[in-house]
Amino acid sequence: MRRVASWTDRMFTSGDPARLFAVFEAYFDASGDPSTAVYTLAVLIAPKNRWTAFIRRWCAAMKRGGADGKILHMRELIHNQDQFEGWTIAQKEQLLRRLFPIIRPIVTAVICPSVPVVAYQRQVGSIEPRDKDNISIRTFALTMCLGRVVNEVHPSEKFPIRPVFEHDPPNDPETHKMFYHLCQMRGWDELFLTPDFQPKGAPPLQAADMLAYSFHTAFSDELAGRLDVQPELRRFLREMLIRMIGKPSLDSKPSKFHFGMFDEAMLAAYRQDTIHAKEVAAQNAALGRAIENSFKQADQRMQEERNRMARAER
């Protein structure tokens, strides 16, 4: 992964005029933890010049929605906590109706995989393994997310993506380490720059939080088969997601939105692929050691022959 001192002197050339003179930035946020039914990771990707317009529109919408000077934390908003204490359902819906429509015109892609925690434990293993042979549910989600980013946005060594995460001092080093090793292992180290960590006050991170939380609740409800908590608001969030995603395009244009929940079969297939990859890696390592030993034995025999010939000449 390479560090780039300045982004202002870089140009992204593409067939899409909207991408000219821009470099992509990807904003990540997650919803869920080991105690929840689902772990969701969201990433919003757009050229840098579009994020400038996004920030302006987001701040204006927050002001018109009665949240001027506030930072959107979906959990606080939905559960009337801290800065959103005392807010009515009508106030929350009014704010979110203004925020959701901002995303679609700005982003190049939204990628949001969700992983059911219990199914992951059954098919893959511990969600927070201590050994190096298995990966955490967080690493799994990030792997799937980055793989889709690579396929949809097509970053390159010349035009890499700048990943941005929420600044979280206790966990920033671990996130950086995880991202670095993942890119090294997958051969993506030239496609992504060193991760940046920004305060949650950054509007793109607020938007990532909004989508991560909304998709998380939608898939949690799907998994449970019912709306247990605040059903009115949860239905509203689902409605906002459907409106944002829109209907399938009639002109066959690819969708900007890529989301879904891994099921048992997908996770089981991933597990088998991982086992096979480890077996192949072990076989390749064994083959490499065998070849190396063969070369050493050949060198040793040649050296012995040279020594024998030298003694014969004397």
Image: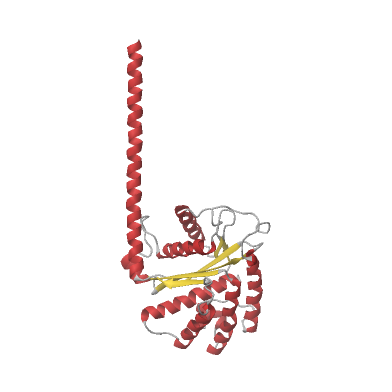
Q: Quadrant of residue 71?
A: bottom right
One can see residue 124 in this view: no
Residue pictured at 33% horizontal, 34% vertical? 294
Q: How is the image coloured?
A: secondary structure
Residue at far top of view: 314
- Residue lying at the far right in this picture: please name it: 9
In the rendered view, does 35 fall on the left or right side of 189?
Answer: left
Report how many numbered discs are placed on residues in the image: 0
The residue at the point 44 percent across, 53 percent down is: 185
Foreground pick, 154 / 58:
154
Q: Is residue 237 left or right of residue 55?
A: left
Name above or below for residue 136 compared with residue 280. Answer: below
x and y, in percent, of residue 39 in the image: 42, 71
In this view, the residue in front, 97 or 79, is: 97
Residue 284 on image: x %, y %: 35, 46
Left or right, 26 with reference to 187? right
Location of the C terminus by quadrant is top left
Q: Position of residue 118 (x, y in %)?
A: 34, 71
Query: What residue do we see at 33% from left, 55% from top?
Result: 276
On the question of residue 312 being in view, the answer is: yes
Where's residue 211, x and y in %?
Answer: 51, 75
